[in-house]
Image: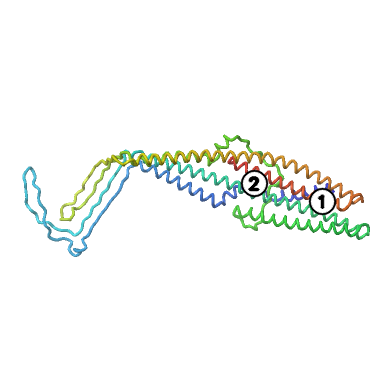
């Protein structure tokens, strides 16, 4: 009988392998491709990368074109007319106070092109550039953290679905075990060899096996619906065969705490946040430093009012210098405020390190202990299988009671379910460890 059960399990595994198998890594990639959260994180990275590039433009000359025009609405019908005139200024040292009648125009206009180049901004431009770089790095690390979370979620859903399939297969095998024993007892009862009590007890166990199958089938369908939804498929789409829950997977990297800290995005983000706050401090205090820029401009403009004088091109060059003198302690208080923010972030970094250390220690403990749990559950399953075979044979030979058979069947199904649950616990421990080491 033991050989029959082994053959049945082999048949189930063969049927699974006959389908195209969806590996855990392949499922991860499907989830990553579909995830809306990851897409949002990537778009945020695109935005911060563009902001970093834009921050560099502040060091370059700025070219502007300015235009202006006015119209006197009270003189719409008089585009020109007599005005107060123009005083002719003398030349060659001679004073000429002659007065030329002017022509009044009810409109004015101007057009100016300017080129300005900042020379020194108190460190503000450089600080803003550093802040933009930090924001871009933080965005990339945030995307990395999002990816770690999505990978863990994908692994959890994958192994839960695989576990549900394993429990369903176990329920099918258990139904077959009970059905075969029911057929034997029913035949003996019809021959008058045993009492109806044995038949009723095995019939009850048969119904229990049916209920277990129904429950396992429901859990299996729900698990595969979640599997499909997470990667963007139709919930009721035919799912690919998954890696069996009891399969031995590839080993995970064994790292120490320092190696884990170097891999964790949130720990690296803490350092970058400190650098960003230092740059923020520079930007905040730069307004209290001297500011200097040069500019060149040129254009055409009429006088105001427009008396008909010739409009000529006027070039202008200038230097703009601003030196703050008294700000009544604003710089000191601003610096003190920014130093406090930096200190807060340094403390936050220490807090993050403690959390990662706790998470890593717990994940490593679960990884080691669930491995022992699997070994114990497998050994227990072997004993339960052997016990069921012996008790069933003894009952059929008339040397055991039906109570012993039912007890052996119960022990078998409990041991089988415990073994599958231990497999799941181990797979989830591996997934949690992978998340902890950012793999």
Task: Count residues near mark 1 (Cα–Cα under 10 Å), then give few for <14, some for 14-19, many for 20+.
Answer: many
**Local crowd at mark 2 within 10 Å, few (<14), some, or many (≥20)?**
some
- Is 341 on the left-hand or right-hand side of 86? right
The answer to which of marks 2 and 1 sits earlier in the sequence is: 2
Count numbered badges in the picture: 2
* Mark 1 secondary-structure assignment: helix
Q: x, y percentage for residue 436?
A: 59, 41
Residue on which disc 1 sits: 409
- Compared to residue 238, the image places residue 336 above or below, namely above
Left/right of residue 282 with respect to residue 355 in the rendered view:
left
Using the image, tell me which numbered label, if any, was put on residue 24: 2
Q: Position of residue 405 (x, y in %)?
A: 85, 51
SS type, badge 2:
helix
Question: Is the C-beta separation of discs 2 and 1 under 8 Å?
Answer: no
Q: Kindly report the distance in space between the C-alpha atoms of the residues bearing marks 2 and 1.
A: 33 Å
Where's the C terminus, which quadrant?
top right
Q: Residue at x 21, y 47 (%)?
A: 314
Residue at left offset 51%, top offset 48%: 41
In the drawing, does residue 154 fall left or right of residue 94? Answer: right
Residue 74, image x, y percentages: 19, 64
Q: Quadrant of residue 248?
A: top right
Residue at the image point whose x is 80% and y is 51% from the top: 410
Of tags 2 and 1, the one toward the viewer is 1
């Amino acid at each position: 009988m033991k050989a029959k059960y082994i053959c049945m399990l082999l048949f189930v595994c063969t049927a699974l392998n006959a389908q195209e198998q969806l590996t855990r890594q392949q499922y991860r990639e499907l989830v990553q491709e579909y995830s809306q959260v990851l897409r949002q994180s990537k778009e945020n990275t695109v935005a911060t990368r563009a902001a970093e590039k834009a921050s560099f433009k502040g060091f370059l000359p700025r070219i502007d074109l300015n235009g202006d025009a006015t119209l006197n609405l009270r003189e719409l019908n008089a585009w020109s007319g007599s005005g107060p005139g123009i005083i002719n200024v003398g030349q060659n040292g001679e004073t000429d106070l002659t007065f030329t009648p002017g022509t009044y125009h009810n409109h004015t206009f101007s057009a100016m092109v300017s080129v300005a180049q900042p020379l020194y901004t108190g460190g503000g431009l450089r600080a803003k550039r550093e802040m933009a770089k930090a924001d871009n790095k933080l965005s990339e690390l945030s995307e990395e953290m999002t990816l770690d979370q999505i990978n863990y979620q994908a692994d959890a859903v994958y192994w839960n679905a695989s576990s549900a399939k394993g429990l369903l297969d176990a329920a099918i095998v258990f139904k077959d075990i009970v059905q075969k024993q029911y057929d034997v007892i029913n035949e003996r009862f019809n021959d008058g060899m045993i009492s109806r009590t044995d038949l009723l007890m095995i019939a009850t166990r048969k119904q229990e096996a049916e209920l277990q199958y129904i429950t396992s089938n429901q859990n299996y369908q729900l698990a595969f619906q979640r599997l499909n939804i997470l990667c963007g498929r139709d919930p009721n789409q035919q799912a690919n065969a998954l890696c069996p829950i009891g399969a031995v997977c590839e080993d995970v990297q064994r790292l120490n705490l320092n190696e884990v800290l170097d891999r964790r995005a949130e720990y690296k983000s803490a350092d970058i946040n400190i650098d960003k706050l230092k740059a923020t401090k520079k930007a905040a205090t730069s307004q209290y430093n001297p500011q200097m820029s040069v500019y060149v401009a040129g254009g055409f403009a009429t006088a105001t009012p427009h008396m008909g004088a010739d409009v000529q091109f006027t070039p202008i060059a200038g230097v703009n210098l601003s030196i703050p003198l008294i700000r009544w302690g604003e710089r000191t208080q601003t610096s003190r405020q920014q130093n406090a923010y930096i200190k807060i972030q340094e403390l936050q970094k220490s807090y993050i390190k403690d959390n990662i250390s706790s998470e890593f220690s717990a994940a490593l403990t679960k990884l080691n202990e669930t491995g022992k749990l699997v070994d114990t559950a497998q050994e227990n399953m072997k004993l339960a299988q052997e016990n069921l075979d012996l008790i069933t044979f003894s009952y059929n030979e008339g040397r055991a009671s039906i109570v012993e058979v039912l007890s052996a069947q119960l022990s078998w199904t409990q041991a089988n379910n415990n073994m599958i649950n231990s497999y799941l616990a181990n797979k989830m421990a591996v997934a949690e460890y992978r998340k902890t080491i950012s793999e």
